[in-house]
Image: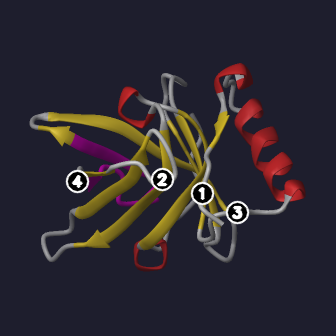
C-alpha cells in the first residue's frame, strides 16, 4: 500500500472528521465521528475517537488509542494501539497539500477512512477521494458515508 511522501506531523495534528469509511466493528452505527490527534512529549500520538452511537443525538462514545510513528522517514506509517501489545496498521495514503483532506488505509485493505478538517466536503472532492480509494484496490461496496449534524 503506497503512502504519501512525507507528513508534517505538527500540521497533521488536530481534528479530522470522518467523511466516509469502511468501518471497523467499533464504528458501526457511528454518527458525528471525529478523530483527534495530539503529539505527546514521548513522540507518540494521543488519539481520541469520538462519535454518537446509533443516531446524531445518541450516547457519546470515546476511544483513546495511541499512535506510534513506524516510519520516521515519511511519518506516514503508524501503528495504532487500541489494546497492548497489538499495533494495527495505519497508513496515510493520501493527504492534500493544505492538510485539509486525507485518506487512511491499511495493507490488508479491510478498512479505510476518508477524513477532512470539516464535517462535509464538496461532491467533487468526495468523488475524487473515492476514486483514490478505488485505485488502491478497495471494494467500494463496503464504503459508507458518515453522517454529521449540520
Circles 1 and 2: CB distance less than 8 Å? yes
Q: Mark 3 — residue? A: 120
Whichever of callouts 3 and 2 sits on the residue coming sooner in the sequence is: 2
Q: Mark 2 — residue? A: 33
Circles 3 and 4: CB distance less than 8 Å? no
59 with respect to 76 (left or right)? left
Pinpoint residue 13: horizontal percent, then vertical percent: 41, 73
Please report the bounds of the magenta region as a residue range: 67-81
Whichever of callouts 1 and 4 sits on the residue coming sooner in the sequence is: 4
Q: Is residue 65 above or below residue 41?
A: above
Labelled disc at residue 64: 4
Q: Mark 1 — residue? A: 148
Whichever of callouts 1 and 2 sits on the residue coming sooner in the sequence is: 2
Q: Nearer the viewer, mark 2 or mark 4?
A: 2
Look at the image and tell me in which quarter the N terminus lies. Answer: top right
Circles 1 and 4: CB distance less than 8 Å? no
Q: Using the image as rendered, state which of residue 57 and residue 21 is in the foreground.
A: 57
149 with respect to 75 (left or right)? right
Q: Locate residue 44: give its quadrant.
A: bottom left
Q: Using the image as rendered, state which of residue 29 and residue 4 is in the foreground.
A: 29
Residue 133, magenta (yes or no): no
* Inter-mark Cα distance, 1 to 2: 7 Å
* Inter-mark Cα distance, 1 to 3: 8 Å
Amino acid at each position: 500500500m503506497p503512502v504519501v511522501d512525507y507528513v508534517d506531523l505538527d500540521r497533521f495534528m488536530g481534528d479530522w472528521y470522518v467523511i466516509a469509511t469502511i468501518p471497523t466493528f467499533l464504528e458501526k452505527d457511528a454518527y458525528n465521528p471525529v478523530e483527534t490527534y495530539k503529539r505527546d512529549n514521548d513522540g507518540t500520538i494521543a488519539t481520541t475517537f469520538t462519535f454518537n452511537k446509533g443516531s446524531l443525538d445518541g450516547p457519546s462514545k470515546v476511544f483513546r488509542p495511541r499512535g506510534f510513528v513506524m516510519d520516521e522517514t515519511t511519518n506516514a506509517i503508524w501503528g495504532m494501539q487500541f489494546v497492548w501489545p497489538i499495533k494495527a496498521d495505519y497508513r496515510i495514503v493520501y493527504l492534500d497539500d493544505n492538510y485539509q483532506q486525507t485518506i487512511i488505509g491499511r495493507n490488508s485493505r479491510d478498512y479505510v477512512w476518508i477524513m477532512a478538517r470539516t464535517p462535509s466536503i464538496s461532491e467533487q472532492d468526495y468523488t475524487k477521494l473515492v476514486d483514490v480509494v478505488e485505485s488502491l484496490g478497495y471494494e467500494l461496496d463496503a464504503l459508507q458515508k458518515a453522517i454529521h449534524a449540520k
